[in-house]
Image: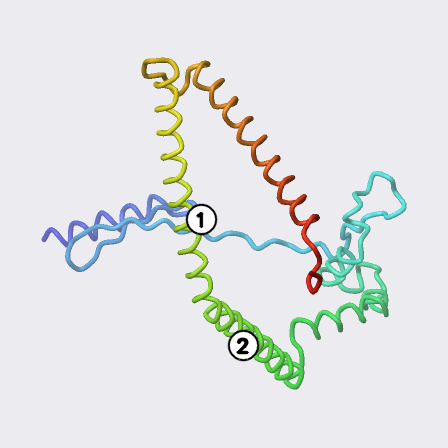
Amino acid sequence: MAASMLVQRAAALCGTFKGISLSKAVLPVACHHGVMLQTRCYNPKPLKLNLRDPYIPDKENEKTPEWQKTARYDRKLFGRYGSASGIEPASLWPSEKELQEKIEEEKEWNPPLEVMLKNIEAKEKEEAERRRAKERLIAANMSKMPKMIEDWRREKRETKQKLKEEKARKAKLLAEARERFGYNVDPRSPKFLEMVAEIEKEEKKKRKLLKRRLKEEQGAAPPAGQS
C-alpha cells in the first residue's frame, strides 16, 4: 500500500513539473523497494561553430596579439574552419629549414637501430676501459702499499724520537735554569726564554767554529797518494 501511495505522489509531481525543461527538472523516482530517489537531469547545448563569420585576426593590425600572427595559430585556424579561414594549405607546410630541424631531431631522439647498436658498443667499450683503468690504479697503489707502510712507520719512529729528544732537552734546560737561578723557573717566563735564546746562540756559535775547523783540517791534509 505504501508503494502505491509513493507511485501516486510521483505521478502527481510529474504532472506538476510538466512543461519545465529537463535541464532544470528534479524528478522523483520510486524504486520497487519503496525508496524515493531524486535525479537531476542536465542536457547542455552543443557549442555552435560559426562557419559563416569566423574570427580571423588581422595580421596587419598593431592591436592584434603576436601569438595570433604565428604559423602555429594559422594551423589552428585552418584546422577549425578549413577553407573558411582564408589560409592557403600550402603555407602550413614546414619550411625546408624547419623540415631539416625536424629530421635532425628525429635522428637524435629516434636513431636507427644500427646507430643505437654502435652507441651501445661504444658505451660498453668506454665503461670497460674505465674499469680497466681503475683496476690498474688499484694494482699500482697496492704495489706501493709496503713502501707506504714502511715510510709511515719510519715517520712515526722519527716523530717519536724527536718528541723524546725535545722532552730531554727541555728537562735539561729546566735543570740548568734551576742551577743558574737557584729555584724552579716557569718555562714560559721571560727569564727562561732569554736563557734558552742565549744557549741556542752559544750552540750555534760552537757549531760554526767546529765546521770551520773541519774545513781547515781538510784543506791542510795532503792529497791522497802523496807522502
* Label 2 Cα neighbours within 10 Å, binned few <14 / some 14-19 / many ≥20: few
* Label 1 Cα neighbours within 10 Å, binned few <14 / some 14-19 / many ≥20: few
> Residue 98: x, y in percent?
81, 66
Q: Determine whether 105 is above or below 162 in the image.
A: below
Kind of residue indicated by mark 2: Arg
Q: What residue do we see at 56% from left, 33% from top?
A: 206
> Residue 177: x, y in percent?
39, 19
Question: Which residue is situated farthest in the left direction here?
Answer: 1
Q: Earlier in the sequence, mark 1 or mark 2?
A: 1
> Where, quadrant-wise, is the C terminus in this rendering?
bottom right
Describe the element under mark 1 as helix, strand or loop: loop
Q: What residue do we see at 71% from left, 58% from top?
A: 223
Taking 223 as reference, is 192 left or right? left
> Residue 170: x, y in percent?
39, 29
Q: Which mark is residue 23?
A: 1
> Residue 211: x, y in percent?
62, 41
Q: Nearer the viewer, residue 25 or 153?
A: 153
Residue 169 placement: quadrant? top left
Q: What residue do we see at 54% from left, 76% from top?
A: 132
Taking 121 as reference, is 105 left or right? right
Residue hosting label 2: 132
Q: Nearer the viewer, residue 25 or 158?
A: 158
